[in-house]
Image: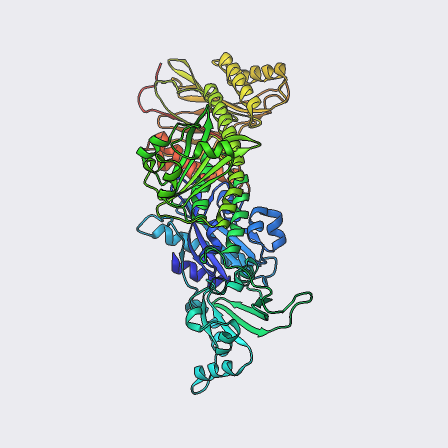
Amino acid sequence: MDAVLADAVRRTGASAGGVYLLEPDAQALGLAVLCGVPVDVAWPWRRLPLSARVPVGDAVREDRLVWVGSQDDMARLYPRAAATLPYRFALAAAPLQGGGRCFGALLLLWPASHPPQATRRERGHIAAAARRIARALEESPAAPVVPEEPRLIPLSTTGTAGAAGAAGAAGRPHGQGAPQAAVDYLERLPEGAVGLDLQGRITFLAGGAEELLGLDADRLVGTRPWQSLPWLDDAVVEDHYRTAVISRDPVAFTALRPPGLWLRLQLYPDASGISVRIARAAPPPGEQSAPGQGARPVAASPGASSAGRLYQLVHLAAALTETVAVRDVVELIADQVLPAFGADGLVLSAADAGRLTITGQHGYDRRTLERLDGLPLDTGLTPAGTVLATGIPSFFATRQELARHHPAAPQMSDKQAWAFLPLVISGRPVGCCILSYDQPHAFSADERAVLTSLAGLIAQALDRARLYDATRDLARGLQQALLPRGLPAVAGLETAARYLPASRGLDIGGDFYDLIRIDSGSAAAVIGDVQGHNVPAAALMGQVRTAIHAAAGAPPDRVLARTNQVLADLEPDLLVSCLYAHLDLAGRRAVLASAGHPPPLLHHPGRPPQVLEPDPGPLLGVDPAAAYPCTVVPLPPGTTLALYTDGLVESPGTDPGALADSLARRLPAHSGHGLEELLDALLRHARPSAHYTDDIALLALRTRPGPAPG
């Protein structure tokens, strides 16, 4: 996959690329491979919920190529991404489809010089690259796995990029002793020359650069300038580097080297790294160049990245506003907050009836969690109750420091350092977030300030998520109460059903199915969809099911007509689609009537499958006097009939009719298998990402061989 990605970047002329893979539960995308940009720049995007409003998420969910041609387009379409990547570049994301499944997405970036629109030829190259990567994943002997940290691979200038390599060779020094001559040339210039790799590390210095920077080469090579030179330890400086490496734009700025030397630095990036020219400069207007002016303090943690931390916080703030459930909040903190601060463990507790109940954790064993779960808020065992009472976070760099204030606390776990963050909203305690470390950890003033600010965002996200979870549980209980708990056993008929709520929302809607046993030789199969995804839709669904049950046994046209009249009396302002099938198992036939519902799939043994097109009537609730034509279908032994709601075949960029045809073609391959396996196959084909933008109800029926019942 690494080689295919590097080749895809070269073939498409992109400056950087990455491969996101779907995680096993198909609910998140993980960055597996990266090239052309540093890992720390991509770190906030290492793991993304599939439901996130980001280009790779849209590409997978909607099975389409996503193109973002400018910074303005990014701000308009993906404001969260624009806030954390405020640079000029073009972007494409394409789904990795192969073997009837989606593996993830290909992400490609182009420099700011790329036109805002992708040509038809470029789109073809991108789609072809995605197919090659999907094929490589499909043919891999081992299942693709998302690593803990994305692999960073180099962008070679060989292979298919031979022309580019030749062009690069044209600009290299020629002649006897050319490399030494080039070095001598640089040494004679009054300015300095520095080479950086794409990670920002210094790889080369000319002698003039040492003099201007004020440090020997052996102390600079291999370091990042903003880490080894205190006067460049500024978020603005690192942001200039990020602009160069992502946008591939030349960047120039001035900086003061204390006590009074102003320098102009010019950055010239390409796919292999960044060339930096350094020259003396006049002080900017209004700036003093007197000795002792302009020096900046050294950061408390020399390995910290000021700009990286800044953008990571913006990213986290935006991401927290998009979390929905408590599980989302926990996963976001574990995946992004812990790595950002080098923490190893997390305990997220919610204040409930005077106790702290653990709602999520990372990095703790079961026994430790049992000791920590349900502690009273006023306990002295840990600082959690104290920080909630005062609203002031507590930081402990060592076990000894914690033991001085809370003697019993170090025995609660084997961690070595802790940050206890109170989660408080308008003076109301919501819970406590505990970050812990496997080794002693000195918290800098910067870390304390950032974590304190972050606690407020986590508190709001947790409070909102708990309310959502409570509402969802209520809605799910209502939904389960309204849907049948199981399908009745009907002689001569094999059955299976599935209900899948939309991936976002309250997990409640108006989709329903039913199987009604009428007598020993007949039954009725029903599927329908009430307009809307809310409690009124679910309530109306229950009323429709009751009306159909009351009329079941009558001819299908009369069942739908009576149900339609019930809706007219209720005046619900909601419309309902419905398909009712009377199954005459003794006579080996079915009589169907449709009220504007998607057509079912049918397969007779030994015959081609088809999308059955019964004559449709209007939706229920449109016309109280509407008539519903009937369609008769034979049911020889082994016939498979699949009923579904529109959520299975309708999604952005998809032709419902074409998708229904392709689903029907899958029926014969599963004629010898159970119906549960058939439902799984239909869902995998229609929704390979396991992300549902609408509720889906499925009801599969198969007539058994043998004498007809009754």
Q: Quadrant of the C terminus?
A: top left
Q: Is residue 158 above or below residue 458?
A: below
Q: Quadrant of residue 453?
A: top right
Q: Decide if residue 142 is on the left or right side of residue 428.
A: left
Instruction: Confirm whether residue 689 shows in the render.
Output: no
Count of numbered marks: 0
User: Residue 93: percent from the left, percent from the top?
Assistant: 51, 52
Question: As rendered, which of 203 and 521 lies closer to the eye?
Answer: 203
Q: Foreground residue, 311 or 269?
A: 311
Is 548 in front, or is 166? 166
**From the viewer's perspective, is 80 left or right of 157?**
right
The percent position of residue 581, horizontal first and vertical second, equals: 47, 22
Q: Residue at x 38, y 15 (%)?
A: 521
Q: Quadrant of the N terminus?
A: bottom left
Please indicate, yes or no, whether residue 170 appears anywhere in the rendered image: yes
Q: Is residue 68 above or below residue 432?
A: below
| Residue 434 lies in quadrant | top left
Q: Residue furthest right?
A: 285
**575 or 285: nearer the viewer:** 285
Residue lying at the far front of the rendered structure: 404
Residue 255 is situated, as x and y percent measured from the top left of the image, at 58, 66
81 up-or-down from 462: above or below = below
What is the x, y in percent for residue 198? 47, 64
Q: Is 32 displayed left or right of 312 in the figure?
A: left
